[in-house]
Amino acid sequence: MSTSDPTATPTTFDLERRVDSADSTLQTVRHAAVALGSNLGNRLETLQGAVDALGDTPGVRITAVSGVYETDAVGGPADQPSYFNAVVVLRTTLPPLSLLERGNAVEDAFGRVREVRWGPRTLDVDILAVEGVVSDDPKLLLPHPRAHERAFVLAPWLDADPQAEVAGHGPAAELLKGLGGEEAQGVRRRDDLRLRLPE
Ligand SMILES: Nc1ncnc2c1ncn2[C@@H]1O[C@H](COP(=O)(O)OP(=O)(O)OP(=O)(O)O)[C@@H](O)[C@H]1O
Ligand SMILES: Nc1nc2c(c(=O)[nH]1)N=C(CO)CN2
């Protein structure tokens, strides 16, 4: 409206502006970090498929993808195959629970079955952190409650975001150092392998 008179009739232009400004508050854009893991099937193809599927999600834009790390399985049944792990950093307008649901749908699309805790899986998608969000809802704990103690998470996360921090625990670089570095937990960067950012 060209006038501040509250009784004046709003023009179409003015109404559009007000709707736009309401939209911008509904559509908060947040940074988030998502961990990917695979230790069954074609691990590299699965991780790339997961990156592409996440990147294809309306309201999600992937801004960085880590290198690929081959990692000894932590927890669960003995003698599991090694994992390929990676981390993607993204910007999203999705509410955190919708991001989790999308991650679960991508796991299902890659044949994830849930039988044994920490058992082998074609694909695991974990939400590591969502900017400004701390959650104690067991459906979505944020930051991820075990991220700070897992070199297979911290090493690729640092790759994708050297400034990464785990709220309540500190900078990822310090946390990884405190664990004795990546080698201490059997985490090896595979320089011969690479994940592409979605086009
Ligand atoms: N930050 C999070 N990211 C992903 N899942 C979460 C998160 N917080 C809570 N969950 C819940 O954890 C449940 C179990 O997830 P999942 O089977 O992938 O665990 P996991 O990957 O095997 O183990 P871990 O949680 O130790 O990584 C999911 O149903 C989900 O609702
Ligand atoms: N190396 C490795 N070990 C794990 C992983 C993983 O992604 N990589 N995920 C787990 C449950 O999320 C349990 N153990």
Image (cartoon, rainbow, N blue to C red):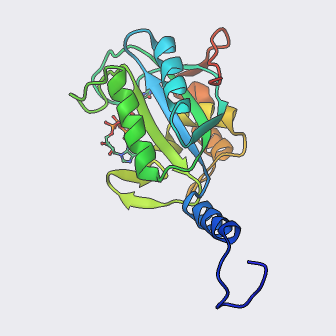
What residue is drawn where x is 52% and y is 59%? 133
Can you tell me which quadrant of the image ligand 1 is in? top left
How far across and how far down the image is residue 63, in percent? 67, 36
Quick one: quadrant of the C terminus? top right
Left or right of 6? Residue 117 is left
Would residue 48 be seen by someone viewing this image from the given angle? yes
Pick the front one: 121 or 106: 106
What residue is drawn where x is 37% and y is 28%? 107
Pick the front one: 8 or 83: 8
What residue is drawn where x is 39% and y is 24%? 123
| Tally of marks | 0
Pick the front one: 145 or 137: 137
Position above or below: 175 against 53: below
How far across and how far down the image is residue 110, in percent? 37, 20
Residue 181 image-quadrant placement: top right
Position above or below: 32 against 76: below
Pick the front one: 162 or 28: 28
What residue is drawn where x is 46% and y is 47%? 144
Quick one: quadrant of the N terminus? bottom right
Would residue 180 be seen by someone viewing this image from the given angle? no
How far across and how far down the image is residue 33, in percent? 57, 42
